[in-house]
Image: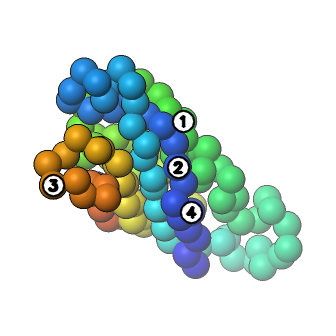
Amino acid sequence: MRMFVNNLAFVGHHGVYEEEQRDGRRFEVDLEVQFERPEGTETDALEDTLDYRGLAEAILDVGKGPSRQLIERLGAEILQTVFERFSVVQAAELTLRKYAPDVPGSPDCVGIRINRTRSEDD
């Protein structure tokens, strides 16, 4: 089964440059996770599945947390948090967009996409 959270927005103080850390920038995250419900839990009860609110909270906890210089690190830490909090998640794809008006050429946004599969260490 797959579950997703798309276009989750927050202001974070991440970046290399002083004004990014001081003033903050708008970020948006798309997260899609693959998970399996335990055998015999084809119910209509929230406790028998993955709660997308929890996924959103994991993203926001990292995104609104301490400043990171690199968007790559921020994305990796969001995924690490998802895998730590939700043992049923087997794989995830994260798209992280940063709205950075000071980038030459004025792109709408810049960002990264990360695919990760749970390892035995997770």
Say which element carries label 1.
helix
Residue 68 visible, this orientation: no
**Badge 4: how crowded within 10 Å, few (<14), some, or many (20+)?**
some
Evaluate if marks 3 and 1 touch, with contact meaning CB atoms under 8 Å apart: no
Q: Which residue is mark 3?
A: 105
Say which element carries label 4.
strand
Residue 14 visible, this orientation: yes
For this orientation, the residue located farthest to the right is 44
Amino acid type, mark 4: Val
Evaluate if marks 1 and 2 touch, with contact meaning CB atoms under 8 Å apart: no
Q: Which residue is mark 1?
A: 61
- Left or right of 40? Residue 110 is left
The image position of residue 88, as x and y in percent, is 57, 61
Q: Which residue is mark 4?
A: 5
Q: Which residue is mark 2?
A: 9
Amino acid type, mark 3: Gly
At a point 48% along the width and 37% down the height, the residue shown is: 11
Say which element carries label 2.
strand
Viewer-nearest residue: 77 or 22:
22
Viewer-nearest residue: 110 or 83:
110
Mark 1 or mark 2: which is in front? 2
The image position of residue 33, as x and y in percent, is 50, 66
The image position of residue 91, as x and y in percent, is 42, 66
Evaluate if marks 2 and 3 touch, with contact meaning CB atoms under 8 Å apart: no
Mark 2 or mark 3: which is in front? 3
At a point 50% along the width and 33% down the height, the residue shown is: 64
- The N terminus, quarter of image: bottom right
